[in-house]
Image: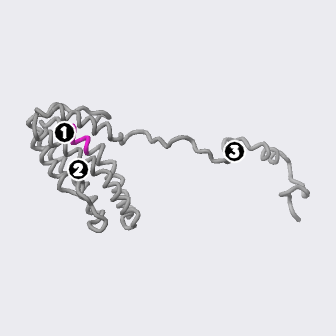
Amino acid sequence: MTNNPKLPDISRADAEPARALEIQLTTRITTQPLHYRSGDEETALASVHSLFGATRKLLAKHPEAAAFEVAALFLLNSIVRPNTARWHRWLVDERFADERGRRQFRYELKQLQPRLLEFTKLLQFMVLGPDQSQSARVLFAKIVELTSDPNRPVDLGESVPSGIGPEVESKRGLLHKDLQREADKPTLSENEPGGPRR
């Protein structure tokens, strides 16, 4: 999958798998509210993760649905997978047992839901057929543009001044001049601060 995929023209073959995936998305927690007092995170994660199996089956069953394939692969690999990979790690690390972990999951799911709802609009264009190719292409380009590349290099920002000054250079083999002067002395005398005590 390229970093900037282009949606081919919609064909009649795209309608059936697009409608099936639209149903999967709109009837799961992927697009429905998850109130803090209802549901549980593990079940919600399983529901989101099940999109992979359902979509793979649709792709295998409809190999002639070229526009659907491009869109579905982008959905799985660039929109859903970055979240499910992280959430699965949390599940393994038992972060859902902690209130903070549960709240973070629900927050991130809530951030994902509008993107998936936007994707259902794209699927609706595919269901309507070839006459909607241009509208679908414009919407897909918008979705791609608003989606971070999951393989992008991480930008941690500018250097942060730490205030420890030239002492950092000692890690590279140079000592601060005062420390170097002390290190160059053959021995410490009893009268010097830090010298041997009897």
How far separated are the C-alphas under marks 2 and 3?
Answer: 51 Å
Measuring 75% from the left and 44% from the top, which residue is drawn there? 176
Measuring 86% from the left and 57% from the top, which residue is drawn there? 195
First in sequence: mark 1 or mark 2?
Answer: 2
Between 11 and 176, which is closer to the camera in this rendering? 11
Q: Callout 1, which amino acid?
A: Glu
First in sequence: mark 1 or mark 3?
Answer: 1
Measuring 12% from the left and 36% from the top, which residue is drawn there? 64
**Residue 122 placement (x, y as % from top left):** 19, 41
Residue 74 within the segment the image draws in magenta: yes
The picture quadrant where one finds residue 125 is top left
In the structure shown, which secondary structural element does the residue marked by tag 3 occupy? helix
Name the residue carrying label 3.
165
Q: Residues within 10 Å of mark 3 (few under 14, many from 20)?
A: few
Name the residue carrying label 2.
52
* Mark 1 vs 3: CB contact within 8 A: no
- Of tags 1 and 3, which is closer to the observer? 3
Above/below status of 136 relative to 58: above
Q: Residues within 10 Å of mark 1 (few under 14, many from 20)?
A: many
Q: Which residues are magenta?
A: 69-75
Residue 69: assigned label: 1
Residue 117 within the segment the image draws in magenta: no
Quarter containing the C terminus:
bottom right
Left or right of 128 on screen, residue 80: right
Q: Callout 2, which amino acid?
A: Phe
Left or right of 175 on screen, residue 156: left
First in sequence: mark 2 or mark 3?
Answer: 2
The picture quadrant where one finds residue 135 is top left
How far separated are the C-alphas under marks 1 and 3?
Answer: 55 Å
Q: Main secondary structure of the magenta part?
A: helix
- Of tags 2 and 3, which is closer to the observer? 3
Quarter containing the N terminus:
top left
